[in-house]
Amino acid sequence: MAAGYLDILRARHAARLLTGTLVGRLPNGTAPIAIVLFTRAEGGGYGLAGALAAVYGLGTAVGQPLLGRAVDLYGQPRVQLPAAVLSAIGMTLLAVVGLGPLPLAYGAVALAGVTTPPLEGGLRALWPSVLGSEDRVHRAYAMDAVAQEVMFTVGPLLVTLLVSLWSPAAALLVINAIGVLGALSVVLSEPSRTWRSAPREAHWLGALRSPGLLALLGSFFFVGLALGSITVAGVAYADDQGQESVYGWLMAALGLGALIGGAAYGARQWSGPPERRLRVIVALLALGYLPLTLTPGVVAMTVLAGVAGVFLAPAIACSFIVVDRHAPRGTVTEAFSWLVTTFGVGAAAGTAVAGPAVELGGTAWSFAVAGAGGVAALLVLLATGRVLAAPGRSAVAVRGSENDRNGAVEPGFSSGHQA
C-alpha cells in the first residue's frame, strides 16, 4: 500500500503540489467550523452561525466553476493567487468587524467564499503532466482523497487549538494566512506555471453539457448536505456534553475513518465500471451516517463517527474517475470545480437545515439530516443509472496533452473499455 503512494511522492514536484494544495485549501476546509465557533463566541445563535456558513458555502459554489473556467482559459497563476488573497481579505474583515453590522458580516463571508481558489481542481489538472502514466494518476486520485482527510482531521483540531490558545478571530486570521502561503507555493511551481488547458469546444454550458456529469453532481449535492449538517450537529453535540473539544475529536474521528478507507481503496486496482462501484460505496456511506442519530456517550459517538467516515474518501476518489469519464474535453479544471461547487451548495444547505433542526428537535434531529442526505445521494445514483452507464467520451487517455484526462480509465480497466 505505502509503496505505491511513495512512488507518486518521489515524482518531481508531486510532494510540493500536494502539500501546497492541501495547505492552500485549509481555509476552505475549516471555514464552516471556524465561522460557527466565531459566531457563537460573538453571541450569535446556531441559526445565525448556520446562515453565515451557508452564505460562505454558496459563495464557494458560485465562485468555483467560474474561477475553474478562468484557470482553463488563462492559466493557474493568474487566477489562483489573486483569488486566495481576496478570500483571505474577506475572512480578515469578518474577524476584525465581527457581527456588529450583519450585512457587512454576510458580505465578508460571501467575498471569502466566492474567491476561494480552485486549487483542488487545479491539482487534478496537473497530475497527468507530473506523473505521466494512467495508473499513477489514478493512484494519485486516491492519495489525494486520503490527503484531504488528513486535512479534515488536522484542520478542526488546529482551529479548536487556536481558539483555545487565542480566540476564534485569531483562528480565522491564522488559518487564512497559512492558506495564502499554500496557494503561493503551488503557483510558483514549474508545473503550475507552464500548464495549459487542452483545446475545448466553445459552449456556454461548458462541462455541464454532459448528462453523466450532471447526474454525478446531483448525487454529490446530497453527500455535501450530509457533511455540512454534521458540522453544526457536531458543535451541538459538544455543547450537550459541556466540552467544546469534543467537536474536534468527532471531526478528527470522521476524518481518520475516511483516511483509513481511502488508503485501503487506493491500495488495489479495481475492475468493473466505476459508476457501479460508486453506487455500492455511497450505499455504505449512507448506512454509516444513520447510527449517528443515536447520539450516545462521547466514546461511543467518536467510534460511530470514525465508522461513518470510512467510505467517504473512497466515494470521493471514485467520483474523480467518473468525472474523468464524463467531462467534455478541455474542461478539466471546470469539471472538478463543479464537483467542489456541488459540495459547497450541499454543505450550505446542510448547515442551513441543521441549525434550525437543533433548535426545533435537538441534536439527534441535526444528525438525522446527515442520514437523510446519504440516502438521497444513493437514490440519485440509482435513478440515473442509465445516464451514468454511458460515458460521453471514449475511454482512451490522451497522453499528448498536458491536462486532458477525460475518458481516462481506472486501474484495472482496459483501454477503450465502456461501462
Image (cartoon, grey):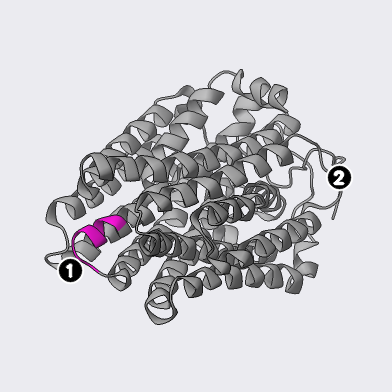
Nearest the eye: 131 or 145: 145
Q: Residue under circle 2? A: 271
Nearest the eye: 258 or 94: 258
Residue 103: x percent and y percent?
Answer: 18, 69
In the rendered structure, does residue 147 fall within the stretch colored magenta? no
Q: Is residue 144 above or below residue 278?
A: above
Residue 272: x percent and y percent?
Answer: 86, 50
Q: Give neighbour class at mark 2: few <14, some 14-19, many 20+ (Cα, 10 Å).
A: few
Residue placed at 13% from the left, 56% from the top?
A: 97
In the rendered structure, does residue 41 fall within the stretch colored magenta? yes
Give the quarter of the figure containing the N terminus.
top right
Residue placed at 44% from the left, 71% from the top?
A: 354
Q: Secondary structure at mark 2?
A: loop
Q: Is residue 184 left or right of residue 256?
A: left
Please identify the quarter of the rendering in which residue 213 is found: bottom right
Callout 2 amino acid = Ser
Please identify the quarter of the rendering in which residue 33 is found: bottom left
Callout 1 amino acid = Leu
Q: Which mark is residue 336?
A: none
Which residue is situated farthest in the bottom direction here? Answer: 360
Q: Which mark is residue 102?
A: 1
Residue 133: x percent and y percent?
Answer: 73, 28
